[in-house]
Image (tube, rainbow, N blue to C red):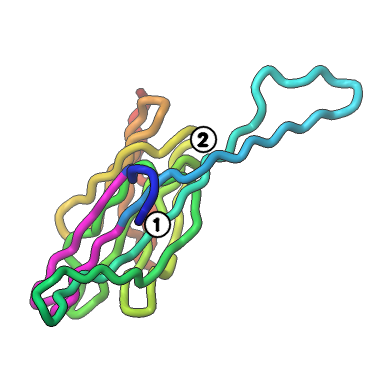
Amino acid sequence: QVGRLPWSICWILPNKKYGSLEYMCIGKSCRTRVQVTKVEGEEEAESPKTERLGRVYLHRLGLGEQGEVLLQEVARRECRAVLDMKWQPGGEGGSLPRLGVCDAGGALTVYVAGEGGLQSEGEVTVSPGLALALDWGPGGQRAAVSDSRGAVHVLQRDTAGQLVVSRSYPG
């Protein structure tokens, strides 16, 4: 049982490139932490700093002996609240699937998914606001992320293979 309704659900289906694995990722916003800080001699802020927390789950799907669908949790990662996530298309040779996650901290985090779970490949902060939506370009070498301020940020892989913001279009 996952609890509250998730923000995002992503699937990767079996194919030649990844073998016979089938994964499902569920990202959700699970709780909110509020931090109130008061400095002596200053008036209290009108609204306290809020940190939205979340979790990304990686499940492996399979069939049991009676044909029933089996769902096995492979990994779970604590993170900022998940607002969108998508599997990166393409990949070189037999590389493992990669999952891009937009979060409430204004960042895009890329995870590598495999039998050992989810390993962070890198994180790029694209906005001081929320990173709301993600879409990958063909082949996964470019991505576009929209934010809560109405801007769209285009990211592409540099010579080291890391995603960097190459262009931003203000909202």
Residue 56 marker: 1
Say which residue appears at 31% left-offset and 75% top-offset. Answer: 114
On the rendered structure, is 134 left or right of 78?
Answer: left
Q: Nearer the viewer, residue 28 or 110?
A: 28
Image height of 91 relative to 53, above or below: below
Q: Position of residue 62 (x, y in %)?
A: 18, 74
Q: Nearer the viewer, mark 1 or mark 2?
A: 1
Q: Amino acid at mark 2?
A: Pro
Q: Bin the neighbour count of mark 2 within 10 Å (Cα to Cα): few under 14, some 14-19, many 20 and up.
A: few
Residue farthest toward the right in the current orientation of the protein: 41
Q: On the picture, is 25 further left or further right than 64?
A: right
Note whether 132 is above or below 13 in the view shown.
Answer: above
- Above or below residue 157? Residue 46 is above
Q: Find residue 169 and report its image quarter.
A: top left
Residue occupying image coordinates x 60% and y 40%: 33
Q: Quadrant of the C terminus?
A: top left
Q: Position of residue 112 (x, y in %)?
A: 34, 69
Q: Residue at x 90, y 21 (%)?
A: 41
Span colored in magenta: 8-25
Q: CA distance from mark 1 to mark 2?
A: 22 Å
**Left or right: where does residue 165 sit relative to residue 69?**
right
The reply to whether the magenta stretch includes residue 11 is yes
Residue on which the image places disc 2: 128
Q: Position of residue 88 (x, y in %)?
A: 24, 59
**In the rendered image, which quarter contains the N terminus?**
bottom left
